[in-house]
Amino acid sequence: MKKIVIFLCLFAGSFLFANEAHDLATELHYLESYKQGVQTAKKEHKLMMLVVVEDGCHWCKKFKRTTLSDEGIKQELQGVVKVLVDRYANMPQKYESRFFPMVYFIDPKTQNILVKSYGYKTKALFRQEIQKATKKLNSLE
């Protein structure tokens, strides 16, 4: 009986995690699948941004509310394929983290990380990271 209760708690917990990430992705109009993000970025020859969040994370919500929702940041990200997933999403192990939010700017051809950023970032700091990742990707082409 104890095992059943633990299983149900874990199952319900993973469902709740996915819902919060889903809500954030929906509000921001981001993709919700790492695999789909890579395919789209390859097809469109664009930089990919992977945002990994955790359920109940105050800093994740603040990052979405104050930085990712900013019109200037949205413009900076126009040429970027944006993906937002929960930390338990199906993605390569190299994107696992203990800090949230976690943002990876990824070269879609190689799936190598160009820039890695963790924690809440102000608009100014995040803008610099977007520009750094864009420059790195352009220098590879």
Image (cartoon, grey):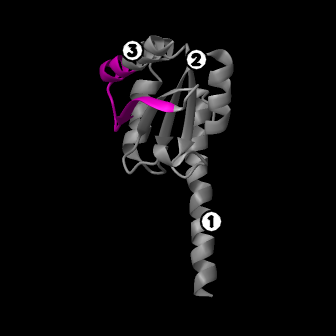
Q: Amino acid at mark 3?
A: Gln
Q: Is residue 88 visible?
A: yes
Q: Amino acid at mark 1?
A: Phe
The image position of residue 14, as x and y in percent, is 59, 58
Residue 116 lies in magenta, yes or no? Answer: yes
The image position of residue 88, as x and y in percent, is 55, 52
In the image, 5 versus 81, the foreground residue is 81
Dot 3 falls on a residue whose secondary structure is helix
| Residue at mark 1 | 11
Q: Earlier in the sequence, mark 1 or mark 3?
A: 1
Please state if 127 lies on the left or on the right of 68 as rendered: left
Task: Estimate the spatial distance between the alpha carbons at disc 1 and disc 3, rounded to whole Å.
Answer: 39 Å
Dot 2 falls on a residue whose secondary structure is loop
Q: Quadrant of residue 6?
A: bottom right
**What numbered label is drawn on residue 79?**
none
Dot 1 falls on a residue whose secondary structure is helix
Residue farthest toward the bottom in the current orientation of the protein: 1
**What numbered label is drawn on residue 131?**
3
* Vertical side of 86 occupied by 78: above or below: above
Residue at image point 65% right, 37% down: 35
Range of residues picked out in magenta: 112-129
Task: Estimate the spatial distance between the alpha carbons at disc 2 and disc 1, rounded to whole Å.
Answer: 35 Å
Q: Quadrant of residue 33?
A: top right
Crowding near the residue tagged with mark 3, few <14, some 14–19, many ≥20 C-alpha atoms within 10 Å: few
Please state if 130 lies on the left or on the right of 83 as rendered: left
* Vertical side of 100 occupied by 39: above or below: above
* Vertical side of 30 occupied by 124: above or below: above
- The answer to the question of whether label 3 and label 2 lie on touching residues, with beta carbons closer than 8 A, is no
| Residue at mark 2 | 46
Please state if 31 lies on the left or on the right of 94 as rendered: right
